[in-house]
Amino acid sequence: MAYAIVTADQVSIFSGENVDATATAAMKEAVELMGISRICGWARYNIADNYASLNADYKKIIDEYLARLIATASIAYNMAGFSSRLEAENMLNINLFEMTKIEDNFFKDQKWWTYAKGV
């Protein structure tokens, strides 16, 4: 699977071993691209084209957000692989909680983007 920014391993760690495999690679890639667009909007900067120039520590936060976004979409797409719906919903809630923290504490702060761009 070829993601634009994240790796399959990064996504797997947040989706868990019980995630159903019916979400296709194309679906997951589409979710990543939507997430990249969302981040570009917050940053007012094209992170996709300029990813290599971003600060390495800040890239890890972007990677985590995108991996959690893809994992969340994969879990929500089909919860059948989990031992219960409650287990799947717990995975969703953990990812959504962490994504909200990243959005509120980093992505929506223009000063953060100044440092991320190394300016």
Image: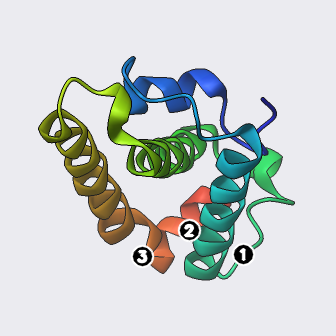
Q: Tell me the kind of residue under disc 2.
A: Trp
Q: Quadrant of the N terminus?
A: top right
Q: Secondary structure at mark 3?
A: loop
Contact flag, marks 2 and 1 (Cβ < 8 Å): yes
Q: Is residue 12 left or right of residue 59?
A: left
- Residue at 48%, 46% (x, y): give it: 61
- Marks 3/1: CA–CA distance: 13 Å
- Residue at 42%, 77% (x, y): give it: 108
Q: Earlier in the sequence, mark 3 or mark 1?
A: 1
Across and down, in percent, residue 57 comes to 54, 39
* Towards the viewer: 48 or 119: 48
- Marks 2/1: CA–CA distance: 9 Å
Q: Earlier in the sequence, mark 2 or mark 1?
A: 1
In the rendered view, would you say 77 is above or below 25?
Answer: below
Residue 45, labelled with which disc?
1
Q: Secondary structure at mark 1?
A: loop
* Towards the viewer: 51 or 94: 94
- In this rendering, the count of numbered labels is 3
Q: Is residue 18 left or right of residue 30?
A: left
Q: Is residue 3 left or right of residue 57?
A: right
Contact flag, marks 3 and 1 (Cβ < 8 Å): no
Across and down, in percent, residue 33 comes to 72, 60
Q: Tell me the kind of residue under disc 3.
A: Asp
Q: Is residue 69 left or right of residue 30?
A: left
Residue 113, labelled with which disc?
2
- Marks 3/2: CA–CA distance: 7 Å
Contact flag, marks 3 and 2 (Cβ < 8 Å): yes
Residue 109, labelled with which disc?
3
Q: Residues within 10 Å of mark 1 (few under 14, many from 20)?
A: some
Q: Tell me the kind of residue under disc 1.
A: Tyr
